[in-house]
Amino acid sequence: MQQFKTPTFIIHVAGWLLFLTFPLLFINNEQSGQSSFLLLASPYYWLFCGTYMLMFYFNALVLVPRLMFKKRHVIYIAVVLLLFSFVYYAQPYDNLLGHNKSVMAALNGPPNKQPKGLNQSLQPGKDPDVGPNVEMPFGPLPNEDLRMQDPNLKKPDGILELHQPMNIDVISLFIFFMIMGLSIATSTVQRWQTAESKVVKAEAEKATAELSFLKAQINPHFLFNTLNNIYTQSVINSEHTSESIMKLSNIMRYVTDDVTQNFVMLKDEIDCVRDYIELQRLRLGADAEINFNVQGKPDGKKIAPLIFMTFIENAFKYGVTKKEKTVININLSIDTERIDFSCQNKIYNHKSNLERSGIGIANTRQRLSHLYPQKHRLDIENTGSMFTVKLCVDC
């Protein structure tokens, strides 16, 4: 048998408790004044309830999964017909009702004799209890007629027939169809839930694998560009080479240790962006105007790692030229419930980097869709001369 989860188990228990009270309410309504405790002590009551409980779980856990779901419909119908025949001939509800009446009649004792005056007014003919000269206008009562025919005749007590001709236990058959229908519905819903959970799990595993792949693409790309910058400084014997190496070391530590998580502290992400911008400032010198403004407090907030870095890298790829002064504006606004990021730069043609930049933005879009479903907004505007990125994420 399959193990029930806690909410499902509670539902089953509540349902069967309602089912167990059904005979108590119905029979007590039919036999007013009788005690429910007497019915609970009857073996026919537990046989009645146990029969339908066994049929429910036998159909839900055995017949439906092994026959119905595997398209063995002929065998399934045959087994259901056998169960139907058993209920039809066993008549569990009628037997329970008849047994309860017999027990109560035995406990209450034989009926009292009617008063003589009543016999004289209702029963015609001669009655040995009343006298030879008293006649009754309506003829002998049925019980008296049977007693006169056979004085030794007694009503059987405790002997129940399985099936009485011309008598169909409609209530038992109705309960049978209801139980079978509910068990089929339960198995179908459980199978659907299992399939849905497998699909959700597969999608989650796929999303995790894709996210790991995207990170693997971003990190080497980012480090490769930074190493190229330091190499250029070393070739021209720049005095800032050692400082650049230190900042790169900080960035590499962050990338290798923290970026493995889906979310990192926003403060650490801002420090990484600052180190990267400082590396670019050292490379470009005084000819570049790089503005990085942070508004708000990042304490306690988290963000997806390197989610801003793709756009910042593109700004330094396409917004730098030797013909005029480089101007790049990067703004980060931190609010209670969201983070707003913007990056703006002029566009200069660098056809060699165009394809790689497109891949980086596409990867960032995918990461945002995985990590911030329905919780982010990314607007990219390219006017031909100015490139502007606006990203808003809920935190």
Image (tube, grey):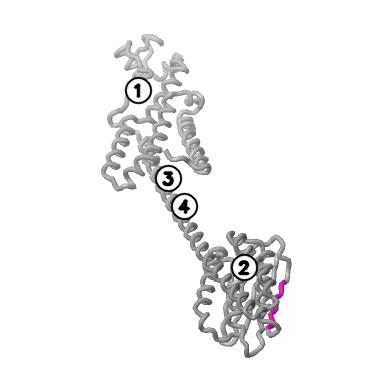
Choose between 79 and 158: the one closer to the eye: 79
Q: Viewer-nearest of labels 2 and 1?
A: 2
Choose between 283 and 380: the one closer to the eye: 283
Would residue 22 be visible to someone looking at this image?
A: yes
- Where are the magenta residues, as a range? 288-294
Type of the residue with mark 4 = Ser
SS assignment at label 3: helix
Cβ atoms at labels 2 and 4 below 8 Å apart = no
Cβ atoms at labels 1 and 3 below 8 Å apart = no
For the point 40% across and 20% down, which residue is it? 122
Q: Which tag, 2 or 1, sits closer to the chain's start?
A: 1
Q: Which tag, 4 or 1, sits closer to the chain's start?
A: 1
Q: Which tag, 2 or 4, sits closer to the chain's start?
A: 4
Q: Viewer-nearest of labels 3 and 2?
A: 2
Q: Which tag, 1 or 3, sits closer to the chain's start?
A: 1
Rendered position, 82 above or below 202: above
Q: How far separated are the C-alphas under marks 2 and 1? A: 75 Å
Disc 2 residue crowd, few under 14, some 14–19, many 20+, Cα 10 Å? some
Residue 152 lies, in percent from the top left, at: 32, 11
Residue 160 is labelled as 1
Residue 197 is labelled as 4
Disc 3 residue crowd, few under 14, some 14–19, many 20+, Cα 10 Å? some
**Residue beneath disc 3:** 186
Q: Is residue 293 magenta?
A: yes
Residue 305 lies, in percent from the top left, at: 61, 65
SS assignment at label 2: strand
State which quarter of the image contains the N terminus.
Answer: top left
Type of the residue with mark 1 = Leu
Rendered position, 284 above or below 84: below
**Residue beneath disc 2:** 393
Type of the residue with mark 2 = Val
